[in-house]
Amino acid sequence: MDSDRLQRELEAIVGARRVSMRPIDLDTYARDMWPRLLLAHREGEPPAHRPFAVVWPEHVREVVAIVKKARELRIPIVPYGGGSGVCGGAVPLHGGITIDTKRMQALRWVRGDELICDVEAGLSGERFERELARRGYTFGHFPSSIYCSTVGGWLATRAAGQLSTKYGKVEDRVAGLTVVTGRGEIIETDGPNRALRGPSWTQLLVGSEGTLGVITSARLRVSPAPQLKVFRGFEVDDVTTGAHAIRRVLQRGLRPAVIRLYDELDTLINSLGSGGSSADTVHVEDTRAPVPPIDTGALPAWPEAAPEAAGVVERLMNLARGKGLRQGALHAALGRSHLVNKLAGTVAEKIARRGCRLVVGLEGARIRTEVEAALTFGELEAAGARDKGEDPGWAWLAHRYAVSYRMSPVFRDGAFVDTMEVAASWERLMDLYDAVRAAIGRHAVVMAHFSHAYADGCSIYFTFAGTAPDARAAERVYDAIWRDGLEATTRVGGTISHHHGVGALKAPYMAGEHREAMAIFEAAKASLDPDGILNPGKMGLRVRIDRSQP
């Protein structure tokens, strides 16, 4: 069918003002924040995949009508929340209609007797939390993307907020969903029709990234707003000691809201990049003190390279401070990634005069939080952690969203940066750290922190930065990083994603992790979306829709 007919059909559903086929809108909705696509965008290249149209529904009935029309025309549907995803989950790989849910943004009710709220999928995270706080509650979900992500996006990707150790990931906080399937039918997974036995339909749909249905609203569990917040900083000799300390705390039954361990290089970058003060709290550490000179004379194993490595680390510190670098300096800093990764731990420790930073925070009812904080700090010290007082913890809280906004200068100056969040049981965690760090380190400068910790395991969040002479070469390096990193993850028994989702980026690795279970996923897809119109090309599912343009 032609574009004019498609526009008329959609305008008949939502009105002319909520349909767009303007090139500027189609270009905008052609990508999310997947760094691989940002490389081409930086070079001024047009998007490789654009939707045919963008629509902004305001009610579930309109979503139903749009999906039915797409099914009739056999063109894809791509749900879109805030566009903050970093795995290409909202990229229209086969064109189609992008459904932006942000006009569906009501917090419809909060029931204090049940601690349940009903919220529409398009509400932004920051507004959601602010509305709950005004009523005396919290959802407890604070991702770095909270200002630009939506409730529906969290649910679609099984997201985790920074306080997930206490509150759980989003799938732990959802009681029920309203979803429009690929058949154009509405499913409600809770309420009086909820099955009391059998499979959890809610959990089947959470994390499916728009491949099984379009989430339009959800019933979510809330908690009373905390009466007290306690934050603390510790230091440990090395990553292994820190991981053991975290495991000890959680397997004693304690549940801090957040507990994060940074490896040596991340400790250095984190310390020097988070400086400044905050009007919100007086407990902020001033990390802008002069950096001690680097003693290169005692560096082991590669003495001839130590001064060069020190210079590279200094350039990375300037990036962390937000100073940015000219392209030549940045390429010099990142072009010796193998050297930096070998020496960074030793150099970082000498600069910072410490091993690894550990931050812990607790919140909740006053008396319980005071008792749990004392027990948590005692367990950390018993495991070898050294108490550094309140300031490092409050400093982390004041700057906890800053890291995402420090990535843009890296792309602007000709390099690339991304994060890889994988997870494993405690038994396999250090193998995961060593394997993935080595795999990424062949191609880029890499650092890591451990966060989202639970009694049975933990997530590791690797940050890497690299460079290449042009966009095509950068894409090859970027693809090699992800290929080697995810293959290493699967090899040691880790999971390829803890909370960023799968999208297009990790789709080729789904079968390697889930194996025979992918048949169940495919069967659910065939039942709920028999024509294959929902977000084709994602999650490792077979593509069953034509590529024809309208």
Image (cartoon, rainbow, N blue to C red):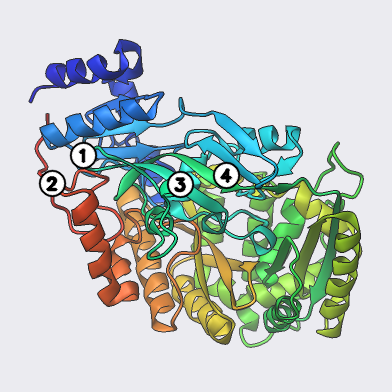
Question: Residue 64 placed where, x, y %?
Answer: 28, 32
Question: Residue 177 placed where, x, y %?
Answer: 44, 46
Q: Taking the image as drawn, is residue 509 in sight?
A: yes
Which sits earlier in the primary sequence, circle 3 or circle 2? Answer: 3
Label 3 to label 4: alpha-carbon separation:
34 Å
**How many neighbours does mark 1 have within 10 angstroms: few (below 14), some (14-19), or many (20 or more)?**
many
Three-letter amino acid code of the residue under disc 2: Ile
- In-image side of 11 versus 208 (left or right): left
Q: Residue at x 76, y 68 (%)?
A: 358
Which sits earlier in the primary sequence, circle 3 or circle 4? Answer: 4
Residue holding disc 2:
545
Q: Are marks 4 and 1 in contact (CB under 8 Å)?
A: no
Residue holding disc 3:
192
Three-letter amino acid code of the residue under disc 3: Pro
Q: Residue at x 46, y 77 (%)?
A: 494
Q: Point out the frontmost of discs 4 and 2.
A: 2
**How many neighbours does mark 2 have within 10 angstroms: few (below 14), some (14-19), or many (20 or more)?**
some
Residue holding disc 1:
76
Choose top left, top right, bottom left or bottom right for residue 311: bottom right
**How many neighbours does mark 3 have within 10 angstroms: few (below 14), some (14-19), or many (20 or more)?**
few
Which sits earlier in the primary sequence, circle 1 or circle 3? Answer: 1
Label 4 to label 1: alpha-carbon separation:
27 Å
Label 3 to label 2: alpha-carbon separation:
36 Å
Judge whether 83 appears above or below 28 on screen: below
